[in-house]
């Protein structure tokens, strides 16, 4: 009841505002631009509240409160008033309409669903025009299949067929809570969240990976004992560090050229390969790990 009362109050306020003649509108706009007259700006904005309400009514089909749409539209209206250039000789209503519409559309995209949709111009056009085009095509020829309708819409809006199908599915469904009980399992407390597929590896594969990792670290540590101190430092800094030191950095640290660092690294890698044939996995271990 409070929301309905607020809507009516805003509508009554808007309808009570006087219309502005072209010259009066121009005078107010110049006062705002030249003298930063806040009262002049507010008079322009209030006189165009009817435009905000009319546009908000067109977006009521998205299920959001009219009062919220009007408030967002008013923000767009004030933005238009702040940016309006009276020297262009364009009526304020023509200019403000774009800002009001953009403000409402952004609000709808942010709040229509908990799942955030695309914000590109093509995705916005698809979101706000899909239902209208779908109804128009179905009314013109009710024998058209969904596939044919989607293709026509994709061509009309310049988007892909997959985008149209995805958006149609979003607009046709409602958000569902992951804490909602699973149908058919009355009383056992199971929720939709429990049915989501985990991205983690199965427990047996996780354990296997840990064991294999420990094996490889042991073989590598043993092979590293075949390197001298400088080779060990370069391999650890270049190959076993997350950052990966550059040849220049190591050259400056060791007092040698970067080309010399590269030569030492190449030699150390060859020594490691040879050492791993001795310390590394035996053929039977490789076959075991493959399974």
Image (cartoon, rainbow, N blue to C red):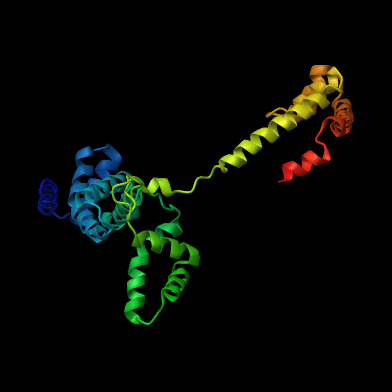
Q: How many marks?
A: 0
The picture places residue 225, in percent across and down from the top left corner, at 83, 21
Is residue 154 shown left or right of residue 52?
right
Whether residue 246 is visible to the viewer of this picture, yes or no, is no
Residue at 11% in and 49% down? 13
Residue at 79% in and 21% down? 233
Q: Where is 215 relative to 120, above or below? A: above
The picture places residue 83, in percent across and down from the top left corner, at 34, 46
Whether residue 228 is visible to the viewer of this picture, yes or no, is yes
Query: Quick one: 208 or 92, which is closer to the camera?
Result: 208
Residue at 23% in and 48% down? 68
Query: Quick one: 27 or 216, which is closer to the camera?
Result: 216
The picture places residue 110, in percent across and down from the top left corner, at 35, 48
Q: Where is 163 relative to 250, above or below? A: below
Q: Where is 140 relative to 121, above or below? A: below
The picture places residue 123, in percent across and down from the top left corner, at 43, 58
Query: Quick one: 236 or 133, which is closer to the camera?
Result: 236
Is residue 211 shown left or right of residue 76?
right
């Amino acid at each position: 009841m409070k929301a309905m009362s607020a809507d009516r109050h805003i509508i009554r306020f808007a309808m009570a505002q006087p219309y502005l003649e072209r010259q009066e509108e121009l005078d107010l706009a110049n006062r705002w631009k030249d003298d930063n007259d806040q009262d002049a700006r507010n008079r322009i904005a209030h006189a165009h509240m009817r435009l905000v309400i009319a546009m908000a009514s067109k977006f009521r089909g998205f299920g959001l409160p009219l009062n919220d749409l009007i408030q967002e539209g008013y923000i767009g209206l004030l933005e238009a008033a702040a940016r309006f250039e009276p020297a262009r000789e364009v009526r304020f209503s023509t200019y403000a309409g774009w800002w009001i519409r953009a403000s409402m559309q952004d609000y709808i995209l942010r709040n229509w669903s908990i799942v955030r949709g695309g914000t590109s111009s093509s995705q916005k056009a698809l979101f706000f025009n899909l239902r209208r085009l779908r109804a128009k095509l179905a009314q013109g020829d009710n024998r058209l299949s969904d596939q044919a309708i989607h293709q026509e819409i994709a061509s009309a809006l310049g988007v892909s067929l997959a985008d149209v199908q995805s958006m149609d599915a979003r607009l046709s469904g409602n958000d569902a809570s992951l804490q909602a009980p699973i149908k058919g399992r009355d009383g056992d407390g199971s929720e939709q969240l429990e049915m989501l597929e985990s991205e983690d590896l199965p427990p047996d594969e996780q354990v296997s990976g840990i064991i294999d990792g420990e094996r490889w670290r042991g073989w590598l540590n043993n092979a590293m004992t075949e390197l001298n101190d400088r080779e060990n430092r370069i391999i650890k800094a270049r190959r076993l560090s997350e950052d990966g030191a550059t040849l220049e950095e190591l050259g400056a640290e060791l007092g040698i050229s970067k080309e010399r660092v590269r030569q030492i690294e190449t030699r150390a890698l060859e020594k490691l390969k040879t050492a791993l044939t001795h310390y590394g996995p035996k053929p039977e271990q490789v076959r075991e790990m493959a399974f």
